[in-house]
Image (cartoon, helix red, strand yellow):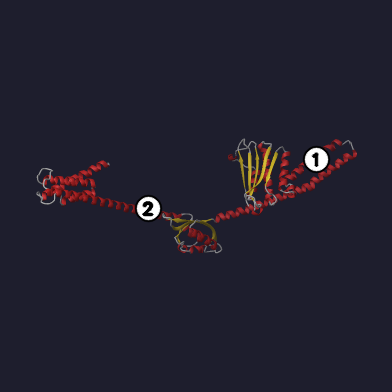
């Protein structure tokens, strides 16, 4: 119903109530001797003020008094009040009626407000009960352990998953009983972490082993957050418990595979070194000796009928010796073992200069404290990156930089060739896979930045042991 129509209905009802009160009063006593507004008028005013509002109640009071004056007070049939006592009575009736209206209206507003507050509180309590029931149902079926404490830190609730994970009942976990599920070797560390976090009212995360009643072990990690009320007062902790046994097993398996791969790479490097030494000290020495004998033969006998053939053989031997040396240097450069990484990188740059790629080396790092495996990783990443520059970039120039960073080394190989779309995906070559695995096994990361027509930059971030970081460096 529109508000204007509802107001009209209320005022119409008030008018009818006023007329009814006057008629009833006139029937009971047509010639009143008392105040012009007696109990019946006040009763109508009260009813109107209580259920219809202050405005309709004022209408009832006005209409009731006017009709009472018109019909009941002399001179009859007029709204004029001539006698002083009637005038005083009328004023008193108006004051009493308005006072009654004000009191009833105020009381009605208070009642309405109280009813609204009660309704809102009941609704809030109903929603809270529903929320608690939904939370409890969700917590019980959640595939994660959930626990709750009180303000003193004692456990007050654990869900079904926690019970299944620990092999204990919910009652056994209450208070401090949850500690019985933790492996005795891990319990002191867990308790220290919990006490420190509780004293500081901060979140915490701790990893530990759970000992099941039958003796089996599970690995778990707990994360908990403090909860505060609207005034900022601490109320309790709530946290989760995750079973990470499968994850730990996967990590362990991955670590074993990485160790196998690391050993394979080291064995490969050793085999390369061995083959390089065998070629250098065996085949190359025989080839060099053969060449020297032929050169001596030509020198001692001068021109012979087979001089052309001998010169051809000498040329082939020279090429074979040069290629053999190149193979040996590619397998494991002797300079890496004899003179160190810096000289080996400079020698590698000279090799590619001979192949048509001018390489600018910028080495700004202390390389004396690097382990042999890390030196080999840096050398192989630079070697493979320069091979890609020579084969795929179309550029005749590359820049190699090796510099100290905070706690590590950064190797960059950059060219200004044709580049490629890194985001296009596609199969990766064995060289790129090998570089990535070498860097990862060394504890670092490899990144390739490239765009068509804008060249390529290969960046390798490699960690250094703390002892290898010199004093005064950014990581010291």
Q: Quadrant of residue 387?
A: top right
- Say which of 8 and 103 sits in front: 103
Give the residue drawn at x 70%, y 49%: 269
Q: Is residue 211 visible?
A: no
Give the residue drawn at x 71%, y 45%: 345
User: Which mark, by number, is residue 348?
Assistant: none
Q: Is residue 345 visible?
A: yes
Q: Quadrant of residue 12?
A: top left
Q: Which residue is mark 1?
A: 318
- Say which of 7 and 403 sits in front: 403
- Say which of 213 and 281 sits in front: 281
Give the residue drawn at x 86%, y 43%: 293
x, y (%) of residue 403? 66, 46
Residues packed near mark 2 inside 10 Å, few (<14), some (14 to 19) or many (20 plus) = few
Q: Along the polypeptide, which appears first: circle 1 or circle 2?
A: 2
Q: Quadrant of residue 400?
A: top right
Q: Residue furthest front?
A: 84
Q: In terms of secondary structure, where does tag 1 sit?
A: helix
Q: Is residue 372 above or below residue 215?
A: above
In the rendered structure, the answer to whether residue 14 lies left or right of residue 77 reads right
Q: Is residue 210 above or below residue 23?
A: below
x, y (%) of residue 133? 40, 55
| Distance (Cα) linking label 1 and label 2 | 92 Å
Q: Which residue is mark 2?
A: 127
Give the residue drawn at x 70%, y 40%: 359
x, y (%) of residue 160? 46, 58
Q: In terms of secondary structure, where does tag 2 sit?
A: helix
In the rendered structure, the answer to whether residue 202 lies left or right of residue 258 reads left
Q: Residue furthest right?
A: 301
């Amino acid at each position: 119903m529109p508000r204007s129509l509802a107001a009209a209905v209320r005022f119409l009802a008030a008018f009818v109530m006023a007329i009814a009160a006057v008629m009833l009063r006139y029937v009971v006593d047509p010639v009143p001797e008392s105040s012009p507004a007696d109990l019946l008028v006040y009763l109508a005013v009260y009813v109107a003020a209580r259920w219809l509002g202050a405005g309709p109640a004022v209408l009832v009071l006005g209409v009731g008094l006017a009709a009472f004056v018109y019909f009941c007070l002399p001179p009859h049939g007029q709204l004029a009040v001539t006698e002083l006592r009637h005038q005083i009575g009328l004023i008193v009736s108006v004051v009493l009626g308005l006072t009654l209206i004000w009191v009833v209206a105020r009381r009605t507003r208070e009642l309405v407000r109280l009813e609204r507050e009660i309704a809102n509180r009941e609704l809030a309590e109903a929603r809270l009960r529903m929320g608690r029931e939904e939370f409890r149902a969700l917590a019980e079926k959640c595939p994660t352990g959930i626990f709750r404490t009180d303000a003193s830190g004692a456990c007050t609730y654990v869900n079904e998953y926690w019970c299944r994970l620990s092999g204990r009942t919910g009652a056994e976990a209450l208070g401090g009983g949850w500690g019985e599920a933790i492996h005795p070797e891990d319990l002191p560390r867990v308790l220290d972490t919990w006490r420190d976090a509780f004293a500081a009212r901060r979140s915490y995360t701790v990893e530990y082993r759970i000992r099941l009643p039958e003796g089996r072990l599970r690995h778990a990690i707990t994360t908990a957050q403090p909860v505060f009320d609207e005034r900022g007062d601490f109320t309790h902790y709530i946290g989760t418990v995750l079973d990470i046994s499968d994850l730990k097993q996967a990590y362990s398996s991955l670590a074993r595979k990485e160790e196998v791969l690391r050993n394979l790479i080291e064995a490969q490097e050793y085999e390369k070194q061995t083959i390089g030494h065998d070629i250098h000290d065996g085949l190359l020495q025989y080839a060099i000796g053969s060449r020297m004998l032929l050169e001596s033969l030509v020198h001692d006998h001068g021109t012979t009928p087979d001089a052309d053939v001998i010169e051809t053989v000498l040329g082939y031997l020279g090429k074979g010796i040069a290629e053999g040396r190149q193979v040996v240097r590619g397998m494991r450069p002797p300079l890496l073992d004899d003179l160190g990484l810096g000289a080996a990188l400079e020698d590698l740059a000279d090799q590619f200069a001979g192949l048509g790629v001018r390489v600018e080396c910028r080495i700004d790092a202390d390389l004396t404290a690097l382990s042999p495996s890390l030196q080999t990783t840096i050398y192989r990443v630079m070697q493979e990156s320069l091979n890609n520059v020579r084969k795929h970039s179309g550029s005749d120039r590359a820049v190699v930089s090796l510099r100290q960073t905070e706690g590590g080394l950064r190797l960059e190989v950059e060219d200004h060739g044709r580049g490629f779309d890194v985001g296009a995906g596609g199969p990766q070559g064995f060289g790129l896979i090998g570089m990535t695995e070498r860097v990862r096994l060394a504890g670092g990361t490899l990144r390739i930045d490239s765009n068509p027509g804008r060249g390529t930059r290969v960046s390798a971030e490699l960690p250094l042991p703390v002892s290898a970081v010199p004093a005064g460096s950014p990581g010291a």
